[in-house]
Image (cartoon, grey):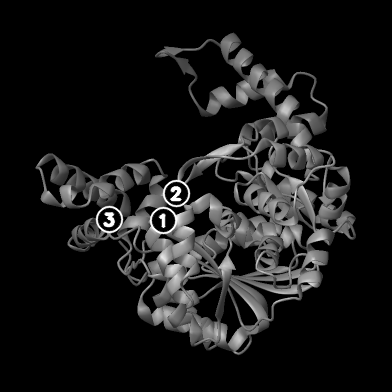
Amino acid sequence: MADWGSGYVVDTAYVHDFCRVQVPAMLSFAALARGVAATGGRGEPLHYCDLGCGQGLTATIVAAANPNAKVFAADFNPTHIAGARSLAEAAGLNNIAFHEADFAELADDASVPEFDIIALHGVYSWIGADHRKAIVALIRRRLKPGGLVYVSYDAMPGWAGMAPLRRLMVQLQSAQPQASSKRALDQALALADRLKEAGAHFYRMYPQAAVQLERLRKLPASYLAHELLTRDWQAFSFADLAQELATAKLSYLGSAHLTDHVDRVNFTEAQQALLADLADPLIVETTRDMIIGRQFRRDVFAKGFTPMAPMAARERWLATRFVLTSPRDDIELSFDTPLGRFQLRSEIYQGVIDAFAAGPLRLREVIERLPETSLGWVSLTDAVKVLVGQGHLAPALPPEEETTRQKSTQAFNAAVMARAKETTELRYLASPITGGGVRVDPLTQLYMQARRKGIADPAALLANLATANESFETNGRKLSADEVRAQIAARIATIDEHVVPLLARLGIG
């Protein structure tokens, strides 16, 4: 393996992933959920920074869907930056700049602008102390007063059992530095299996480690290598991370995962009573993690903030637009929580979902469409938080300047779809409504292209493309050309019925 990575995996490129919660509108709404007004929710001009941007897909989508934003994205891996620049250039984006640099170089670079938002997704747990100090110094110097920082990281106590096994995997990889990350990963997983088969007492002490490892195995190998083989990995207690960021004058604002804001979804009444008796916010958050056994945190910090007066906060809620990001009929009124399978009350949620099915609406407009009920303000706003947290709803940008956003996202989406014949890695398109991304699989992208070109029989075209890239089988039998075409035609019918209307609602045609 190359040695310029400071212990980070560099011979395997990271996945092309999109992080919805680090979109400006989502972070602004996370602040609003805590009663704080923050930039990003109105499509206004702002400076946005994505530190450790990886393949740059999130940063590029933010730039495409928020043309008033100036996006600064940095990663130390030149392969990532080269690919990200290529996509941004193909999309004709002139409001994003990609930089190949490490955090120390950025912290000392006087040309780096001041930012309204700095995002660090999947970075902080995977770098050493010196790099974290450089990040904190950069935030201290370049984040504007009132600005937001989004940081995600592996958390304690959820990684307590897995941490020793992960450390052993890194030691195994370090003992053979010339081995590729793929070979090192295969060997590390094999060692974990042999330990279990040999009856290692570790697995009896920490049974959750085996469960966690099986969950990780289902993830792409390129992701897993970065997750498990990085030398300087650390899972943080919330209080320890908050203490590090406090030197940059940051204060904890709340979770970027909106379902975390609704205690009755996550805690029993006895657990809520325990938390209510605690005064120190750092102890409260650490205790919440202990109760849940949290493995991953998505935190929003601010460089100074003042909570809004209750009436001002309510008015901002009422003026905020939201849009459904799932087909209405696909939204389940139950989901898994730390308490088990949680059932939502249909008399509350179904009316809210039905109202938003009409298209992007301000919350004030939704209230006007709801039937006469005893639904209170807290129940309504909790319902919105839960639906946003579960990915069925998203804050939407104001309709003003939507035409400008549409032009920018169309160019980006065309650049992505033009690559759908060659790669299946780019699975997100940009929405001028949400200011973020929407997951759209390559087949749907190809079908959308065929529709635009007016191709009379898109099923035949897509069947030919599909069979050239993958083998279609049923029960071990290879399907005939006609059978493949029938499968593709069935998938197209589903796309027409469910996906196309959803994309139209999100401004993607």
Towards the viewer: 266 or 456: 266
The amino acid sitting under disc 3 is Met
Disc 3: which residue: 162
Q: CA distance from mark 3 to mark 1?
A: 16 Å
Residue labelled with disc 2: 338
Between marks 3 and 2 in the image, the one whose residue lies nearer the viewer: 2
Element carrying mark 3? helix
Q: Nearer the viewer, mark 3 or mark 1?
A: 1
Which quarter of the rendered picture does the N terminus lie within? bottom left
What whole-number distance in Å separates the C-alpha atoms at marks 3 and 2?
19 Å
Whether the residues at callouts 1 and 2 have beta carbons within 8 Å, the answer is: yes
Q: Quadrant of residue 458?
A: top right
Tell me which amino acid carries mark 2.
Pro
Residue 468 image offset from top left, x and y in percent: 55, 25
Question: Residue beneath label 1, please?
Answer: 292
Q: Secondary structure at mark 2?
A: loop
| Label 3 CA crowd tier, 10 Å (few <14, some 14–19, many 20+) | some
